[in-house]
Image (cartoon, helix red, strand yellow):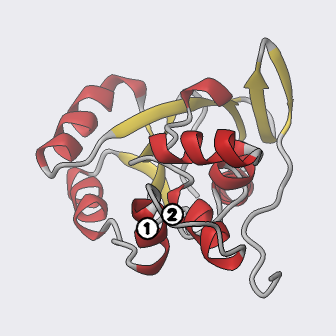
Amino acid sequence: SGAKEGDIVAVTGELGAASAGLNILLKKIPLEGYKKLVDAQVKPIARVKEGRVLARRGLVEAATDITDGLASSLWQLARESRVKLIIEHEKIPIHPLVKKFSQKYGFNIDDFTLFGGEDFELLFTIRSKVWNRVRLALKRVGTKATPIGQVVKGRGVFIKKDEETKLLEDRGYEHFKY
């Protein structure tokens, strides 16, 4: 609930793998070449050490996991912090196999990266002046962090895609949907 105007919005890792893996399992799509996606679903790795690094540094303004989907988590962070988030679609780090899988089978990649769940990654906001310190601290524990947007004055969550900025749907992984 501590995000502040001017903060960078960032995530750990790459998104979409677990949701794509669930899709493979439920639709009985051939596993060949996509085992890492299924592994992300059935053998998730929580970002505990990364969370500890972020907490220990005292540099994070707000943070949450994104196991119920990035869009849902962004909305939760914005509501709790009473701020507006502007996310840049092209900066969202997508697992390379998710791109390949989506193209091959005709899926909308946003369904996996924005609205799918079970990616055990972290969403956090930090002051821009400490970005490099945080990025390097996470890199030392083997994790990539990517800035995907910023906190601005106002309320809500908006996504910028192809020079158009629009309200991001407030939805995420829906338990028991299948």
Taking depth in this image into account, of 136 and 151 the one nearest to the observer is 136
Image coordinates for residue 156, horizontal then vertical, percent? 81, 43
Image coordinates for residue 84, horizontal then vertical, percent? 74, 38
Q: Which residue is mark 1?
A: 40
Q: Which residue is mark 2?
A: 119
Residue at 80% across, 83% down: 178
Report the side of 69 relative to 161 (left or right).
left
Q: Which mark identifies residue 50?
A: none
Numbered circles on residues, count: 2
| Residue 85 in the image: above or below residue 45 | above
Asked if one can make out residue 81 in the rendered structure from this viewpoint, the answer is no
Using a 10 Å C-alpha cutoff, classify the residue at mark 2 as few (fewer than 14 neighbours), some (14 to 19) or many (20 or more).
Answer: many
Identify the element where label 1 is drawn. helix
Taking depth in this image into account, of 34 and 154 the one nearest to the observer is 34
Asked if one can make out residue 150 in the rendered structure from this viewpoint, the answer is yes
Q: Amino acid at mark 1?
A: Ala
Taking depth in this image into account, of 70 and 82 the one nearest to the observer is 70
Taking depth in this image into account, of 31 and 159 the one nearest to the observer is 31
Q: Amino acid at mark 2?
A: Asp
* Extreme residue toward the left, this view: 140
| Residue 116 in the image: above or below residue 106 | below
- Please report whichever mark, 2 or 1, sits nearer to the chain's N-terminal start: 1
Marks 2 and 1: CB-CB under 8 Å? yes
Image coordinates for residue 62, horizontal then vertical, percent? 49, 53
Residue at 74% across, 83% down: 175
Report the side of 132 relative to 152 (left or right).
left
* Extreme residue toward the bottom, this view: 176
* Extreme residue toward the top, this view: 163
Residue at 55% across, 62% down: 66
Instruction: Tell me the quadrant of the picture where the N terminus can be found.
Output: bottom right
Residue at 31% across, 45% down: 59
